[in-house]
Structure formats: structure tokens, C-alpha cells
């Protein structure tokens, strides 16, 4: 499957609004938001915050963001059984994730990694990419 | 089970239902109860939204209170009056619902909810799906038995410390047993978010009274609550540390930050706008 890459310019275009939304959703000041700040480990985000974030982004950018979209996009055309087994990412799955989440420092991809721990890697830039892809999908649908 | 469908169910009948899209319903506050707090009216609207969502998945999943973008308190319902309830679902998916809703009494709006989001979880963790299906059928057919509501006890809140007009810290002691546990989530007893918010608003009103100064001709009321986020379940016997902080004040109005923690962990956040309304 060919995937058009998200460029730094794409991210720059949406980042200011995404940063504001992350700040509002997590109840932290805007100056604590950086593109690469891990949302769970440094800003104490929880699962309800991610739900909040997704709905706020959908409303702000007028896009639809299906649940599990980040992992689904990371997996791409790799069959599910080759991406993860019994809730743990395979080596191939971990490589795919690392290729996809380029905004995450390489040393944060630790093997073995449970699928449930993938959100621990997410940063504001991860959500910028989600928005950019959702905008592209909306344009295609239109 | 004692209390089930009686101690924390604030919907008598569903008058129209488009599963996953919209619903209308009614609830009559029994004449014998005292005041019916506005937070329980909000709970009524949320319960109608929950049925509208559960009806799409044969009650296999149920939404929980998660986020409430804005609640506007416009009036109150008196004992014996009937509240007309309405919800419109912005989206209804397997993982979450988003909705807004409102409540009217005799065509006058008393409450509006907007930008609400509830995560959808397996219903069997919280109640027997077959019981939920039976309740849904009852609500759509003849309606639930009238006057089944048991009054909900006021939360047990004790002020710990504070700075007059600036902040108050208090403890809410969740009872070890209460009828509402068996009705709210029979298989998972927790303090309902609406009761936590009711307790927080009591403290916010007290703080706003200090902030704005007591004026005998005016009554302080919550006008709006925004950005409520319920982060974790609060079990029976928990001690909830509630803190309210004055964030802003203006002529006749104060904005109060609401925070709740259990064992040092944040379990709920939000903010309330308290205003002075002239007594009639």
C-alpha cells in the first residue's frame, strides 16, 4: 500500500491548533506542550483524555478519526497476525510502528512491547499526523 | 435486587426512539421527595442518551459518563412535576458516543447539555444485559412504575481547610453501602459522577458566597459547568478529596475550578460558573 508521507510543512500547518487542543484537553498550560512530549509519561494523559482529544480534533478540523486509526495505519498492509501476537508486537510489528511514529525517539521502542502500551508513545505530533491524514481522507471522500 | 431500577433511575418512559440518533423521554419527580437537584436532571438526560446508544447494540455495550463539555442550569423541577427529556446523538460508535440533550418542564428549558462524550464499554461488566434489555422494553412500552424513586442521600462532605474566598478543601466520604450502588451499576458499585458533581457544586456555592460577599436579596446558583472530565471510578468507602478554587470573579459571578482526587490520583476535573440571582 502506498502512503503519501506527512511532511514537516503539513505538521507545521496544523500544529498550533493541535497544541491548543492538547493543552485544553489535558488541562495543562500551552507552554508545556512540545511536538515530541510523551502525553502519558510527561503530561499524565489517560485513556479518557485520548477520547477527549480525538473528539475535540474531529470538531476543530471537521474530520472523522476512527478509533484505533493510529495502530491501523502503522500496521498498513502487514497482516494482523504478523503485526502482533497475543497482545505483544512482533519484531516486524515493532519495526512498522517505529517507521510510522517517526516523531518518537528510537530508544522508546522497547522489545517486547505490548499493544496496549502503544499509546505511551503518542505525542502531539502523532495527533498532527492523524489530523493531516484525516483531512486527506476527507478530501478524497469529497 | 433492592434498589435496582429505583434508587438511581431517573427516566419513567421513552416516548420516541431512533436508535443511535435521538430519543425523547419523561420523568416525573415523585411528589413526596424534597428538592430534586439539577445534577440529577443532568443524570436523567445522560440516562436517556445511554438507552439511545444501548438500543443500537442490543444492550451488549453501554456508555459511561466521561466528558461533559457544558451544562447550563436554567431552572429547577419541583416535586410532582414532569421533566420532558431529549437527546440528539452526534455520533454513536462501538467505542464511544457523543451527544447533547436538554430538559424542559412545561415547555420551559431547565437544563442543556452539550459536547458530551461517553466511552462505550461491555455492559456485562456493569449490569446483566438481559436485565437492561427488559428495562429498555419496559421504558418503551408501558413505562416504569410511577413513584419508584427513592430520594438520593446528600453526599457526606466535611470541610478540611481553606482560604476565605480563595479555595476550600474538603473530604467526601463515599458510603460503604447505599441503595444507589445497586441501581447505578449493579455489578460494579461506584459513586455516580452526578453525585460527585452535586457535592462539588455545594462547595463551589459556599466558596462563591465568600468570594462575592453575602447579599440577602440575592441567591447564588450554578449557571454553567464546563469541561467536566471523569477520569476514574470511585468505589464504595473511598475518601474523595475535593478542592474548589476561585479562578475568576466579576460583578455577581465567580468561576470556580473543581478538582477531585482519591489517594492522590485525579478522578475528576471541571469548572463552574456561579451567579447571583435576585430573590423573587
Image (tube, coloured by chain):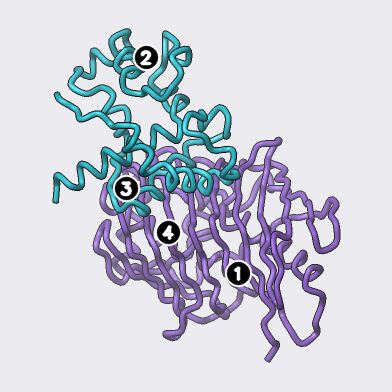
Chain colours: A cyan, B purple
Secondary structure, mark 1, is loop
Looking at the image, tell me whether mark 1 or mark 4 is earlier in sequence order.
Answer: 1
Q: Position of residue B262 (x, y in %)?
A: 68, 40
Of residues A137 and B56, which is closer to you in this image?
A: A137
Q: Which one is in front in this view, the residue at disc 2 or the one at disc 3?
A: 2
Of residues A22 and A90, which is closer to you in this image?
A: A22
Q: Position of residue A71 (x, y in %)?
A: 31, 27
Residue shown at 39%/63% (left/top)? Answer: B100
Q: Which one is in front in this view, the residue at disc 3 or the one at disc 4?
A: 4
Q: Are marks 2 and 3 on the same chain?
A: no
The residue that disc 2 covers is A88
Residue shown at 68%/91% (left/top)? Answer: B280
Secondary structure, mark 3, is loop
| Marks 3 and 1, how far apart at CA | 28 Å
Check residue B37 in the rendering and tell me which mark sits there, or answer none.
1
Query: Could you tell me if the residues under marks 3 and 4 are in contact, i.e. CB atoms within 8 Å?
Result: no
Kindly tell me whether residue B127 is visible in this rendering.
no
| Marks 2 and 3, how far apart at CA | 31 Å
Amino acid at each position: 500500500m502506498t502512503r503519501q508521507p506527512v511532511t514537516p510543512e503539513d505538521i507545521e500547518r496544523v500544529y498550533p491548533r493541535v497544541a491548543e487542543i492538547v493543552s485544553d484537553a489535558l488541562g495543562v498550560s500551552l507552554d508545556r506542550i512540545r511536538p515530541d512530549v510523551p502525553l502519558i509519561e510527561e503530561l499524565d494523559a489517560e485513556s479518557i483524555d485520548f477520547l477527549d482529544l480525538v473528539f475535540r480534533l474531529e470538531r476543530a478540523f471537521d474530520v472523522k478519526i476512527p478509533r484505533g486509526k493510529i495502530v491501523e495505519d502503522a500496521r498498513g498492509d502487514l497482516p494482523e497476525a504478523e503485526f502482533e501476537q497475543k497482545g505483544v508486537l512482533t519484531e516486524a510489528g515493532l519495526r512498522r510502528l517505529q517507521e510510522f511514529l517517526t516523531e518518537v525517539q528510537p530508544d522508546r521502542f522497547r522489545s517486547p512491547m505490548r499493544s496496549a502500551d502503544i499509546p505511551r508513545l503518542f505525542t502531539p505530533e502523532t495527533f498532527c499526523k492523524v489530523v493531516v491524514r484525516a483531512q486527506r481522507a476527507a478530501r478524497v471522500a469529497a | 435486587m433492592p434498589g435496582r431500577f429505583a434508587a438511581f433511575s431517573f427516566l419513567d418512559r421513552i416516548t420516541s426512539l431512533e436508535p443511535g440518533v435521538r430519543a425523547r423521554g419523561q420523568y416525573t419527580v415523585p411528589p413526596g421527595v424534597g428538592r430534586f437537584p439539577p445534577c440529577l436532571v443532568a443524570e436523567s438526560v445522560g440516562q436517556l442518551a445511554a438507552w439511545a446508544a444501548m438500543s443500537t447494540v442490543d444492550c451488549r455495550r453501554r456508555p459511561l459518563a466521561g466528558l461533559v463539555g457544558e451544562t447550563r442550569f436554567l431552572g429547577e423541577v419541583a416535586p410532582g412535576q414532569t421533566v420532558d427529556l431529549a437527546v440528539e446523538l452526534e455520533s454513536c460508535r462501538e467505542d464511544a458516543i457523543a451527544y447533547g440533550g436538554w430538559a424542559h418542564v412545561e415547555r420551559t428549558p431547565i437544563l442543556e447539555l452539550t459536547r458530551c462524550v461517553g466511552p462505550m464499554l461491555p455492559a456485562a461488566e456493569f449490569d446483566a444485559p438481559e436485565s437492561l434489555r427488559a428495562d429498555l422494553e419496559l421504558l418503551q412500552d408501558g413505562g416504569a412504575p410511577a413513584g419508584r424513586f427513592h430520594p438520593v442521600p446528600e453526599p457526606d462532605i466535611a470541610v478540611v481547610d481553606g482560604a476565605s474566598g480563595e479555595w476550600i478543601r474538603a473530604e467526601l466520604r463515599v458510603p460503604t453501602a447505599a441503595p444507589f450502588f445497586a441501581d447505578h451499576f449493579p455489578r460494579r458499585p461506584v459513586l455516580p459522577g452526578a453525585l460527585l458533581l452535586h457535592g462539588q457544586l455545594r462547595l463551589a456555592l459556599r466558596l462563591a458566597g465568600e468570594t462575592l460577599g453575602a447579599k440577602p436579596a440575592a441567591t447564588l446558583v450554578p449557571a454553567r459547568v464546563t469541561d467536566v472530565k471523569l477520569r476514574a471510578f470511585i468505589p464504595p468507602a473511598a475518601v474523595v478529596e475535593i478542592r474548589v478554587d476561585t479562578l475568576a470573579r466579576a460583578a455577581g459571578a465567580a468561576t470556580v475550578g473543581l478538582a477531585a482526587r482519591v489517594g492522590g490520583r485525579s478522578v475528576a476535573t471541571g469548572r463552574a460558573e456561579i451567579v447571583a440571582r435576585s430573590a423573587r
